[in-house]
Amino acid sequence: MFVDELEIRVRGGKGGDGCVSFLREKYIQRGGPNGGDGGDGGDVVLLPTTHCNTLYPLTGRRLFEAPSGGQGQASNCGGRDAEDLVLEVPVGTLVLGKEHGNVLADLDRADVPFIVARGGRGGLGNTHFATATHRTPRQAENGKDGEDRQVRLSLKLIADVGLVGLPNAGKSTLLATLTRARPKIADYPFTTLEPMLGIAEGPGGTFVLADIPGLIEGAHRGRGLGDKFLKHVERTRVLLQLVDCSELAAAPPVEAFRVVRNELQSYSPALAGRPSLVVATKVEDDAARVLVQQLASAIDQPVLAISAVTNTGLRDLLVAISDLLRVAAPG
């Protein structure tokens, strides 16, 4: 199951208590203090990984607590430091403070850990409290509590190319054709209900595509969950706007193009200004080709015509994507 928003509570492990102990051996009746220090509590660590693309494995638990440190022992033996609690999250996860929504970390690089809750320090044993005038201290420190906080995890997928368009524009079919991804595909709107990723091979090498559910008018205000979907193409370097140019299209191509462009602009001008290609889909007859020409004339920019079903135009599309990625800003 795809989960891209999650609130969790994290707590670092408690530090172990210091020990009160004195040296007791034969012929040594009143030995000095030898209580060891407590071990440090474990940290709660978020580890971004490419092995998963959903926060679902973290659902079902509201508290993630690292182990406590070991207690100090006699003979100056320190308690064992606790192991960290490592939680794997997808690359692209934002860590936000629950109360103010401030960004605590942007986990956009794989295998770069972030300590979200530090463990408490272990307490000092009574050895540390001995002085020249107080040689038998019977005091030791208790271990400190670990950090306790509530955070919100928000996943933004990381991909090179984002596919956008109205519902049933052919995004899922294109993704499945160009990559090994297997999204749900059917001829009715809102078949895709969650983002999908796939890896395609172009003349310039491999690149990652992200297919988000279709956008409708008002998506930037949350209609049809559009604001939750659009965040998944915020990190992409290039956008592919797909426009259905078949006779069975839900909207005329020019109108479909303008609706999606308006939603992108309203959601984020920076996203709307990303390098992009306009791709006419389902171009499989003369009537569709006429609509492609009308669309290109109306928006005054080139339109690539493809058919993922017949593989028409896909090679040219891969070349165009590779060329655009070559000059686009790095992710």
Image (cartoon, grey):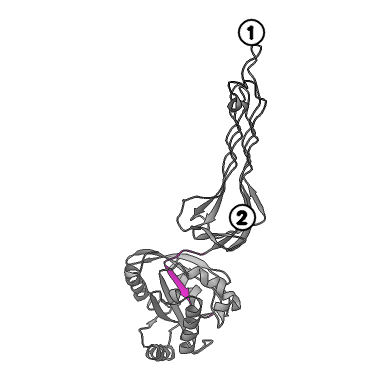
Mark 2 is on which residue type?
Leu
Tell me the tag on residue 27: 1
- Magenta stretch, residue numbers: 156-166
Is 222 situated left or right of 319 in this image?
right
Q: Amino acid at mark 1?
A: Tyr
Q: Position of residue 183 (x, y in %)?
A: 53, 69
Relative horizontal placement of residue 261, taking residue 67 as reference (left or right): left
Quarter of the image that includes the C terminus: bottom left
Tell me which numbered mark, 2 or 1, is placed earlier along the sequence.
1
Q: CA distance from mark 2 to mark 1?
A: 58 Å
Per the image, the residue denoted by label 2 is: 58
Find numbered disc 1 in the image and state the secondary structure of the residue it sits on. loop
Kindly indicate the quadrant of the structure image that contains residue 229.
Answer: bottom right
Dot 2, how many residues are within 10 Å of its Cα: few (below 14), some (14-19), or many (20+)? some
Vertical side of 191 occupied by 284: above or below: below
Measured from the top left, where is residue 324 in percent x and y?
34, 72
Q: Secondary structure at mark 2?
A: helix
Residue closest to the far top = 27
Name the dominant secondary structure of the magenta segment.
loop
Residue nearest the observer in this picture, 307 or 121: 121
Q: Residue at x 49, y 60 (%)?
A: 92
Q: Position of residue 217 (x, y in %)?
A: 55, 83
Q: Is residue 225 magenta?
A: no
Does the image show residue 182?
Answer: no
Relative to the observer, which residue lies in front, 255 or 188?
Answer: 255
